[in-house]
Amino acid sequence: MPKVIDARGLSCPQPVVLARKAMAEADELTVIVDNSTARDNVSRMAQKEGFKVEVEERGEDIYLHLRREEKAETLPLRSAPSGPTVVFIPAYGVGRGPEELQEILIRGFLHTLNEVEPLPDTLIFINTGVKLTVEGSPVLEDLKALEEKGVEILICGTCLNYFGLTDKVAVGSVSNMYSIAEKLLGAGKIISL
Amino acid sequence: MEYGVVVFYSTSWALKAEKVAKEGGFEVKLIPTPRQISSDCGTALRFRWEDREALLALLESKGVRIEGVHKI
């Protein structure tokens, strides 16, 4: 008897989260959802994980029968970088253009890092980017959450000193150019904003 | 904590709503519009679901145009 996950009445991303958890423990399971968004999201995730998906509609409910397919070789979900992922943040914003928009974008980006996978290994804040890490920054909550999940946050000490913000740092650790240069050179992937 | 988001027709309405809500003492945050919600504007205002009625009344009284409200 396959395991049954009842995800009716739950809003995104709960059905996907529940299904994924169950898939880690079972090769065959049924997920019950009640809307097309959940059906599509669960199906897509299951297919990516190597499950065959059969959809059965029963009235308002949608039964998704998932079965792990035998595969000669398991392909990785995404190409893994050969070293740590570093996000380099050299400004109080993303890109060039209106400052207001730059700020919306950096706030959105740092918020979203908490919601997507994979997590970066290190965030480096430099130049005016350091202002994102001090008291009163609109992204402190997001940065603290990332730090709790194990993301390393390095802040340029020279820059903090330049802006007179050294004693206002509220997250991460104050760093120097040696550590920053080593992180960049040792990275598998650098994402520079 | 249960949250909802207000979505807008434009980013400038989202910014205006954030300002009005913060001045009104609401705990809100501008976030990218969650994937499962479709909206013309990629920026949404997250709020505590229990504040829903008071916040929407405030936004309306200040003339902020909203596209919709979703629980997340």
Image (tube, grey):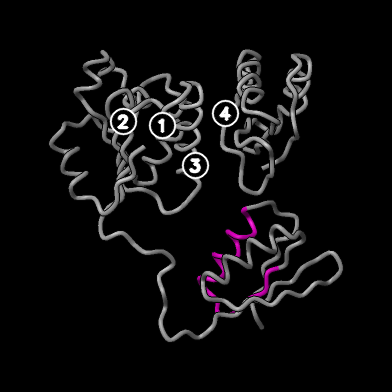
Residue A121 is labelled as none
Q: Chain letter of disc 1? A: A
Few, some or many residues within 10 Å of mark 3 (<14, 14–19, 20+): some
**Are dots 1 and 3 on a single chain?**
yes
Which secondary structure class fits the magenta region best? helix
Instruction: Provide the residue span drawn in magenta.
Output: A13-31
**Are dots 3 and 4 on a single chain?**
no
Q: Is residue A101 above or below residue A18?
A: above
Few, some or many residues within 10 Å of mark 4 (<14, 14–19, 20+): many
The residue beneath circle 3 is: A112
Q: Secondary structure at mark 2?
A: loop
Residue type highlighted by circle 2: Pro
Q: Nearer the viewer, residue A26 or A71?
A: A71
Q: Which circle, 4 or 2, is nearer the viewer?
A: 2
Q: Secondary structure at mark 4?
A: strand
The residue beneath circle 1 is: A95
Q: Which circle, 1 or 4, is nearer the viewer?
A: 1
| Dot 3 and dot 4 residues touching (CB under 8 Å) | no
The residue beneath circle 2 is: A90
Q: Tell me the CA gap for discs 4 and 2.
A: 23 Å
Q: How many marks?
A: 4
Residue type highlighted by circle 4: Lys
Q: Which circle, 1 or 3, is nearer the viewer?
A: 1
Q: Chain letter of disc 3? A: A
The residue beneath circle 4 is: B29
Q: Tell me the CA gap for discs 3 and 4.
A: 13 Å
